[in-house]
Amino acid sequence: MKQKLMHNLNLKVLSVLFSIIIWIIVVNIDDPVKSVQFNDVPITVINDLTLKDRNLVYEIVEGQESVDVSVSGRRSVIEDISKDNINVIADMKEIGDGNTLHLTVTSNKYSGDIDTMKPEFDTVELNIEESKRIQKPILVETVGEPAQDYIVGNYSISLNRVNIEGPKSVIDLVQSAKVQVDVEGATNSISASVPIILYDALGARVDTSRLSMNLENINVTQEILFTKTVSVICSPSGEPEEGYKFTGKVELSPSEVKLAGSKAVLDNISQVTIPASSVNISNLKSNFKTNANVFNYLPNGIESADDSFKGSIAIFVSIEPEIEKNYIVYLNKVSVEGLQKGMSYEIINGSESATENRLEISLFGLEEEFEGVTSSDIKVSIDLNEYMEEKGIETISPGTYTVPVILTLPDGLRVKDELKLRIKITQEED
């Protein structure tokens, strides 16, 4: 009986089939077939050099940039793969009518153990257009305001132009390339690496996702300058032609300037002085006008805090003709100094300057300088000590002398010629 069973082929085959059935039942119970959907798997386009060689660029039609993929297989396999293992490929070599590409789905894990991988849609459509290259200067914008009494100065950048390439429809939107530097509350210059931003004609940012640039960021150094307002002063040099006089009035426009620069330097500047040599009024007989640049008289590195002011100061010097007025001073009002003890004096009538008992004095000056002036404001004196020193004598003997008159005049007035008086000195009797 045992030998009969051992040599029964049909029974052996039946046993194998039964084992397989049992195995299938066990496997399907323990490791069943399972399906899972991976959402938004990105679509990768390959072999796109043919378009680039023709100066063309492409874009997957909006809404088709990714696709949902259903994957089925044994649970042990499906549960061990993720979205990152699924690749959806569109081969540019297979482009069809209407610029469509067929989608191929593969897995980089368990590729032989997956039953099916099916995308939500089988083809993807492309927008294809001309590629364009442009170059734009890079502009620097500041954001915010520096601290009080500080302003934004000049800037420097590592490169000043950017090359941009991409679809013509997008490139044509680009009107400017800018970088922004935040200066809010700043008191010192700022150095930073900042991104380049593209803008359209309305000042809106251009989406650069389809563009390529040779620069993404540039290094910017932005000056932050201290400001200070100071006055400008000037006094002329030289004397006008005889008969004319500088009135003392100098008008400067502007008379104050707002400067910008290093705080350490500006702290030592209280005013700007235009040297007298720059405003020479010698031999003039009318008002004088000129210009001077204040930055010629300031330290290096100091600049205008006002963009509209370039440094030029208009200078107006007032020059007017003198007038002549005559005054009478009585001789008894003339004081004599240096008279030696035991001597007496008498101012003698009959000189050119003295008539009877009075002295006529002609004074010259500006009309406003004569305002309120009377004879009592004119002091006349004779200094015998000064006369003796000039003549080189130690004492004055009794006799008659012609002595210079010393005039003390109101401010601004002058006498044209030197005045002299004759004085008679006598010895007093004991």
Image: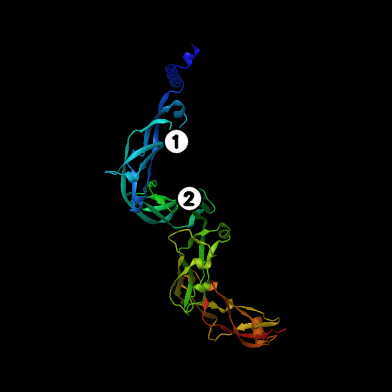
* Labels in figure, total: 2
Return the x and y of residue 82 as percentages of the image width and height: 45, 33
Which label sits in the foreground, 2 or 1? 1
| Residue at (51, 66) in percent of width and height | 233
> What residue occupies the far left of the structure in this picture?
97
Report the front residue among 90 and 340: 90
Q: Nearer the viewer, residue 8 or 268?
A: 8
Please, which residue is most extreme toward the top here? 1
Residue 375, position as x, y percentages in the image: 52, 74
Secondary structure, mark 2, is strand
Check the image and report above or below for 198 versus 377: above
Local crowd size for mark 1, using a 10 Å CA cut-off: few (<14), some (14–19), many (≥20): some
Specify the label residue 77 is tagged with. Answer: none
Marks 2/1 in contact by CB < 8 Å: the verdict is no
109 and 318: which one is in front?
109
Which amino acid type is marked by label 1? Asn
Residue 125 rendering spot, x and y as whole percentages: 31, 41
Mark number, residue 85? 1
Label 1 residue SS: helix
Q: Residue at x 52, y 60 (%)?
A: 230
Gap between marks 2 and 1 measured at Cα = 37 Å
Give neighbour class at mark 2: few <14, some 14-19, many 20+ (Cα, 10 Å).
some
Q: Earlier in the sequence, mark 2 or mark 1?
A: 1
Q: Quadrant of the C terminus?
A: bottom right
Say which mark, if any, is on residue 194.
2
201 in relation to 285, above or below = above
